[in-house]
Amino acid sequence: LKSINTIAVLTSGGDAPGMNAAIRAVVREGIFNDLKVLGVRKGFNGLLHGDFVEMTARSVSDTLGRGGTILQTARSHEFHSPEGVKAAAEQAKYFGVDGLVVIGGDGSFRGARDLSDIGFPVIGIPGTIDNDIPCTDYTIGFDTALNTAMQAVDKIRDTASSHHRCNIVEVMGRNSGQIAINVGIASGAEAIIIPEMKLEERPDIVNVINEGIRRGKTHFIIVLAEGVGGSEELKARAEQETGIDTRINVLGYMQRGGSPTVQDRVMASLMGVHAVQTLLAGKSSRIVGLKEGKVYDIDIAEGLAIQKPMDRKIIEIAMNLSI
Ligand code: F6P
């Protein structure tokens, strides 16, 4: 006998391609299991203010291929106080919600943990382009963002090569270098600079350019993680000390939008279904994730406490291939 009748789903924090596929999976898996499914608009803000909408199987038609989030999202300050968390749980109970699925990044999971700490059943699904949540090997949106950024760098390279220039391309990722290292490898960047590198490990741009010119290179792509910053200083050094014409490209929000890739749609579908099944199994306070190629779930507090340093091997590979 199942003990839950109504579930709700919300998206929180930065939008990510594939969030709609995750919403769709939660809605349809819920309805498939005879649950009533409510959508919460504008993240935890909507929860706090009772902004609920009943979802049907048709509410999520034609959403698989759409970027952004049909439920909209927010970074809520109001929610993150003990009073806010309590008020949000009361709203959810008032609407008869027995369990909540939160799709978002680590900030959103901290909100989820606060709700579960006061006894409200919550399941988190990782949705962020940054892939910076240590308890999961994958976050929904990462692959699409990588492909978008890689294609942008490929285009920038055409001009860099035609004009013998150096282009410093700043990619997103907050404090994580996951986007930068993968885009850098995929686009054959001459140097990649990420927050996970110790200061002495960071490639010296002047050295990279001078050595590259000595080896016959005529143009340079430097992929810089936004978490490191300092693109203007890098440009000034490159120009003053090597004489090469240098440009800065900040890819920005274009990395966060667009139609999700196969990987993001499939991952979102698998994780969405897993979240509903976890609630149906009577579990709560869990984060859904990917571990060793399989979708699994872990206690929220335990998941948030995990720390995962970046694999040093991938940094080494990136450096070795850029000669
Ligand atoms: O977490 C996703 C992300 O796009 C980060 O890569 C970036 O640092 C941040 O969000 C930007 O946040 P905002 O949308 O609040 O400007």
Image (cartoon, grey):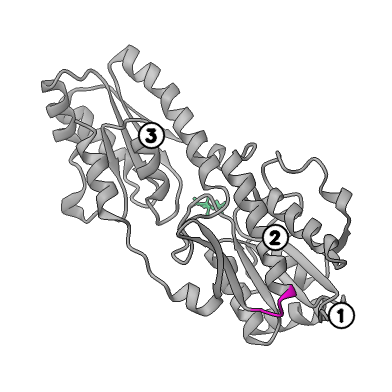
Q: Which residues are magenta?
A: 280-284
Q: Is 281 within the magenta?
A: yes
Badge 1 is on which residue? Answer: 94
Sequence order check, earlier mark of 2 and 1? 1
Badge 2 is on which residue? Answer: 273
Residue 295 — which label?
none
Q: Is residue 30 left or right of residue 188?
A: right
Q: Position of residue 198 (x, y in %)?
A: 22, 56
Q: Camera-side residue: 288 or 80?
A: 288
Residue 186 — which label?
3
Dominant secondary structure of the residues highlighted in magenta in the image: loop
Could you give the CA–CA distance between mark 2 and mark 1, rounded to whole angstroms? 25 Å
Q: Is 266 within the magenta?
A: no
Q: Quadrant of residue 259?
A: top right
Residue 41 shows in this picture: no
Task: Tell me the residue at 13%/22% (across/down).
Answer: 215
Mark 1 element type: helix
Q: Is residue 59 left or right of residue 80?
A: right
